[in-house]
Image: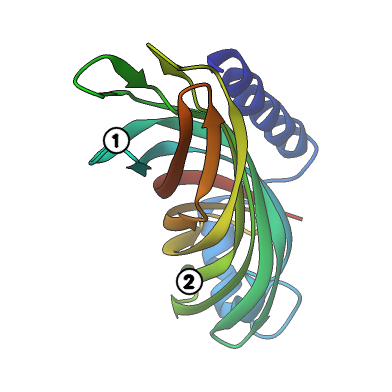
Amino acid sequence: MRRRLFQAVTLATVSMIGVAASSPVLSADAYENLYDAGPGPLAPQNVFEGWYLGGTLGGATVNYDFSPATGDVHTSGILGGVVGGWSFQSGPFVIGIEGDVLAADISGSRNFNAGLNKVSPSIDTMADLRLRAGYTITPRVLLFGTFGGAWANAELPVTGPGGGVRERDFFGWSYGAGAEVSLNPNWAARFDYQFTDFESETVGYPAGQTTYDPDANTFRGSLIYRF
């Protein structure tokens, strides 16, 4: 899983470096002048408009309601990958759509059945597709909210009597908020938080059925290139 995470982050970083190498970068003074230049293709109202692609990296916690045992299974870890999308801007208002493809290493464990068994769920891949809407509080700073669908792939091993190894896909709804800062006409940095409510899945083991109901919290920083 860590290898897959490293590959995803490396791919995103290499892609961004290649784009940057082929694109002119304005100085801070030149970019500042954009906001005094009047109407034009780089006027302030267009700073957050267009197609974009970036690399993202952060942390996550996933808590599983776990039955028939009582209590939750708490897991945590890191994730990273690629974020991209498209935005339309009208004055201070920004709307658009974006998606993520992430590799992850989010794991943990819990003993149950008087310590005879242990469950160790882990998520290694996540993705989502969301609507995004925001408002620019200054020409360079965008506050936004997101809402959409999400997916995660999880391994669900149970050790001990009647256990086994299972794998399931979880689907759910995700919503969150964040802030994005335009650094120059092409580059931006952002931080965002997302909460995802996945639907429960019932999994069969030799000893019987077990139900998992996960909720995820993710915190990420991203470096964005706008085309």
Q: Which of the 4 quarters of the picture holds residue 8?
A: top right
Q: Is residue 141 above or below residue 222?
A: below
Residue 186 x, y percent position in the rendering = 66, 54
Q: In this view, does 161 lie above or below 213?
A: above
Locate the N terminus by quadrant.
Answer: top right
Query: Which residue is depicted at the point 70% across and 26% down?
Result: 11
Residue 143 x, y percent position in the rendering = 44, 71
SS category of the residue bearing label 2 = strand
Q: Give the class, few, some or many, for how many residues have Cα within 10 Å of label 1's Cα (few <14, many ≥20).
A: some
Using the image, tell me which numbered label, if any, was put on residue 144: 2
Q: In this view, does 177 lie above or below 100?
A: below
Q: Which amino acid does label 2 sit on?
A: Phe
Q: How many labels does the image show?
A: 2
Query: Which residue is depicted at the point 55% across and 69% down?
Result: 147
Q: In this view, does 79 lie above or below 212?
A: above
- The residue identified by callout 1 is 74
Q: Give the class, few, some or many, for how many residues have Cα within 10 Å of label 2's Cα (few <14, many ≥20).
A: some
User: 183 or 9: which is nearer to us?
Assistant: 9
Q: Which of the 4 quarters of the picture holds residue 40?
A: bottom right
SS category of the residue bearing label 1 = strand
Tell me whether circle 1 and circle 2 mark residues in contact (CB < 8 Å). no
Q: What residue type is labelled 1?
A: His
Residue 30 x, y percent position in the rendering = 59, 59
Left or right of 76? Residue 206 is right
Which tag, 1 or 2, sits closer to the chain's start?
1
Locate the C terminus by quadrant.
Answer: bottom right
Residue that sits furthest to the left in the current view: 114
Query: Which residue is depicted at the point 45% across and 43% down?
Result: 211
Residue that sits furthest to the right in the current view: 22
User: 121 or 217: which is nearer to us?
Assistant: 121
Left or right of 41? Residue 31 is left
Left or right of 84? Residue 158 is left
